[in-house]
Amino acid sequence: MNDLTCIIIGGGHAGLGALKALKEETRQMANGQRIRFILIDKQPRHMRKMLLFRPAVGEEEIMIPWTQYGFSEGVEFVQGTVTSVEREEKQIRYEDAQGHTARMRYDLLVVAVGSVVRQPDPDQGGIALTDLQTAAAIRQRWRANLRQAVDETNPQERKRLMTVVVAGAGISGIETSAELALEMQKEASSLGLNPSDISVFLLNTQERLFLEGPEQVGRKLDQILRERGVTVLYNRKVMREDAGVVTLSNDDHLPVGLCIWTIGLIPNPALRTMGLPLTSHGQVLVDGSYRVHGAPGVYSIGDCARIVDPTTGKADLMRCGEAGLQADRLGKIVRADLEGRPAPVHKAAASILEFFCIGLGESRGLVWGRKWGLNMILTGKPAWKVRNIAWEAGSKLR
């Protein structure tokens, strides 16, 4: 029986999860077919996107070689960017790391190109935390500002240099602001500055933090952030940053040394050139078993796919936890499809367990879960440990 070629586009959390699940599920298929696995990604290594704030506050390495993964044995890795999926010919067109165009045939294709960080308009100023380059630019900027503050004799200017605004109060903004406040305080102390003069503002357009859970979780987050040195401003939006001044939606002005944008995710814009059916928001259209509409042998999971529980009509969120569950189910779906059996159908993660964990820097975190209508809140060092486990699980390090 002929071998099959399975190409996975995207080596993020969903792509790695899909690769691992597919290898495990198809190892001993009933029909005896063998599968050649190819992972294609624009990065030379896996980037732990959930930890992108870490290089913005320190110098932590968040890139992991593909070969570090035990399930990578026998997998071919191609560095490149897929530009189109030719469904009729069952092949992809891509541009390799040297800029050369090539094609590759597939029998099975998994589209898991994920999401990218939403960026503000260029005239809004500031720096959006989007990739390793912008993370490094943020780190260099706030450190340079603190060094400049050491010799600054004007108290108001020194205060401006020691002030940062984080625009966007989702989990990424919360984690970024908490860790940044701590690192800036440490750096200030080492430079002979007063750590209490560090000001980190987290701008939230909503009336409270963490709308995904109960109000008490938002209050607890606010309390911990205040203890960390972060001030949350509610019902206010950053309109722009210009010449060291942030203008807010209520016409207030904040003198700042740096404005960081963390304003959420959007499906990877690269999808728009691939020729796959998309929603109006740019996600791939799939059925209840992750099969792409009108594309035999093509599946899609993760942030780039619009995945809906056919029973409840509830769509999965763009989160690593959901992607992990989807990847595990995808392995069973593909095996069932290859063996001609009924395939599993998607079930929303929230119908199993609502679960969120947030890192708040240096052995502090918050975990919230709900099952059967019961809320569970965990804080402090135990929550930090859970958050680290989640980070490692997302990158398949556990």
Image (spheres, grey):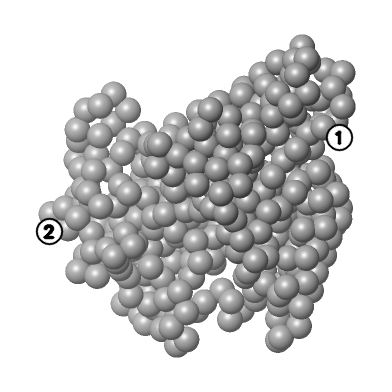
Closest to the camera, between mark 2 and mark 1, is 1
25 sits left or right of 290 in the view: right
> Residue 355 is drawn in which quadrant?
bottom right
In the visual, does 155 lie left or right of 323? right
Task: Tell me residue 345's x, y (percent).
Answer: 43, 79
- Residue 253 in the image, given as x and y percentages of width and height: 61, 42
Pointer 2 and pointer 1: residues touching (CB < 8 Å)?
A: no
The residue nearer to you, when weighing 251 against 198, is 251
Provide residue 323's location: percent of width, then percent of height: 51, 61
Residue with the mark numbered 2:
88
Dividing the picture into quadrants, the one containing residue 180 is top right
Residue furthest to the top: 151
- Residue 196's disc is 1
**Please, which residue is most extreme toward the front here?**
251
Q: Could you classify mark 1 by the number of other residues whose Cα lies within 10 Å: few (under 14), some (14-19), or many (20 or more)? A: few
Residue shown at the point (51%, 66%) measured from the top left: 317
**Image quadrant in which you'd find residue 194:** top right
Q: Residues within 10 Å of mark 2 (few under 14, many from 20)?
A: few
**Secondary element type, mark 2:** loop
Q: Up-down: is 321 above or below 354?
A: above
Label 2 to label 1: alpha-carbon separation: 63 Å
Element on which disc 1 rests: helix
- Pick the residue in front: 279 or 284: 279
Name the residue type under label 2: Glu
Residue sitting at 24 percent across and 70 percent down?
293
Q: Position of residue 81 (x, y in %)?
A: 31, 39
Up the image or down, 46 lies above or below 387; here it is above
Amino acid type at image mark 1: Ser
